[in-house]
Amino acid sequence: MSAQRPGPGSPREYRFPRSVEHLTANGLRIIVLPMPARPLASVQLLLPGGAALETASNSGLTAALARLLTEGGERHDADQLVEASELLGAKIGAEAGWESVVIGASLPASRLAGILDLVAEIALAPRVPEREVDRVKALRLAAIEQSQASPRARASEALIAEIYDEPSAYSRPMGGTRESVAAISRDTLMERHALLLGAGVPTVVVAGEIEASAVIRTVESSPLAQLRASAPAAPTTADAPSTGGAGTAAAPRLLLLDRPGSVQSELRIGKVGRSRLDPLFYAALIHSEVLGGLFGSRLNRVLREEKGYTYGAAAGFEFRRGRGPFTARTAVESSVTAPALVEARAQIASMTSQLPSDDELNAARQYLRGTFPLRFGSASPVAGAVAGLVAVGLEPSELDRFQSAIDAVSGGEVARVAAALDAEAERIVVVGDAATVAAPLRDAGFAVEVRGDARDA
């Protein structure tokens, strides 16, 4: 009698924590997500107006400000802030995103009032010491130099610069460039902070083993209640596509960043992708898993399993309020750079010529549906997910329909995503030894533009 390995069971129904909302007289939005048996609560203050509002000359300003918020406020310097938060069993942090800045902490739910005071202090009147401004600038400039020594980071940074028009915020790293970071001063940081406090509706998200009405009262009696809603910041075109030539179908343009002596090539293929607000968002998730998300995805199966070109290949959309990038990425031995790139492009194109099979669609649905609840075992990711939705203009209830929306995605919708992606201008970047890979790439039909040593860029 032979044993048969059991198949996957039916996924259990999952309900995202129900939110309770309140709007203060000043327009501060409060979202509470009660989670029984989660005594460790999470608090997140979202201030709209992130790095997508930056220009080329001030890029990196929002990220630098977020790092400096935890250097203290009117009543506590950096050390005192750490001590005060630790006495509450908490650790305060701040992070910049494309759409917002978030100040957050996790702590025992019974100590909520204390942490709200500290969050309000650094949100309303951060200290931003001059010496710490210099330190943060030096750290970011060192990170930029370090990224130029990394073929992976260099390829990814060059790709977004190829995909988007130069004035667009998405064409640059969120942390800024050498020139923009060097220009940061305490004055420009405080100007950015003032804009942050007047760029839309501030939102407090609290999750954990809490009682909604009590949390709302606590927030309203805290200094956070001083935050006021205002008109949103003037929109910018953060996602304008590059107007540079992409070559032709017969000879696609390829940017080759020379890295003499490299035995490996980093390959990137990119296009302007889709917004998180796109009606085909869920179909785009399925598309990504079928093409380059799952281990058995088309890219990974062919480039790794069948051809043996790489240890792994991936592709997918990066969703933002604007149209974030779609990227396909892998690293290969130099001698197979050209055939690997040809095959990667063929697999991307296969999403339009060979519609996903039922097996591919079901595998993607099962993975996305099955792993979704695993992300929300504690209060912090629940609060973070809601804050992320609010930042792009969606409601918390969006999370409760995730699994049913994934199940409802049809092959036709995935085909529409693939067709729209196929119509976008293609950008290709390779970081590798030009002496070894340039000729084979040209022989494969690519219009290769070589730029100098990537390590000196």
Image: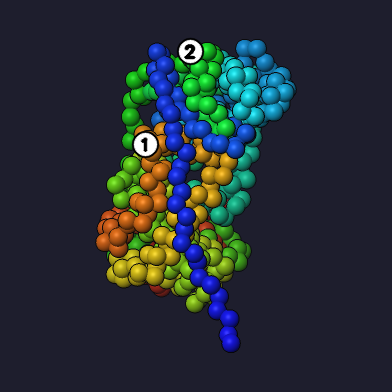
Within-10-Å neighbours for mark 2: few <14, some 14–19, many 20+: some
Callout 2: helix, strand or loop? helix
Residue 231 occupies quadrant: top left
Say whether residue 182 is visible. Answer: no
In the displayed structure, 60 sits above or below 290; it is above
The residue carrying mark 2 is 226
Callout 1: helix, strand or loop? loop
Numbered badge on residue 394: 1
Is 162 left or right of 154, judged from the image as shown? left
Instruction: Look at 40% across and 43% down and name the residue there.
Output: 400
Q: Tell which residue pokes out farthest to the bottom in this image.
A: 1
Q: Amino acid at mark 1?
A: Leu
In which quadrant is the N terminus drawn? Answer: bottom right
Residue 392 occupies quadrant: top left
Where residue 107 appears, as percent x and y from the top left, is: 64, 30
Instruction: Look at 46% across and 31% down and name the residue there.
Output: 100
Please tell me which of labels 1 and 2 falls first in the chain.
Answer: 2
In the displayed structure, 81 sits above or below 419; it is above
- Compare residues 410 and 253 and report the one nearer the observer: 410
Instruction: Look at 39% across and 68% down and name the residue there.
Output: 360
Say whether residue 277 is visible. Answer: yes
Is 292 left or right of 281, judged from the image as shown? right
- Compare residues 174 and 420 and report the one nearer the observer: 420
Q: Amino acid at mark 2?
A: Gln
Instruction: Look at 47% across and 55% down and name the residue there.
Output: 12
Q: How is the image coloured?
A: rainbow
Where residue 49 appears, as percent x and y from the top left, is: 42, 28
Q: CA distance from mark 1 to mark 2?
A: 24 Å
Residue 417 occupies quadrant: bottom left
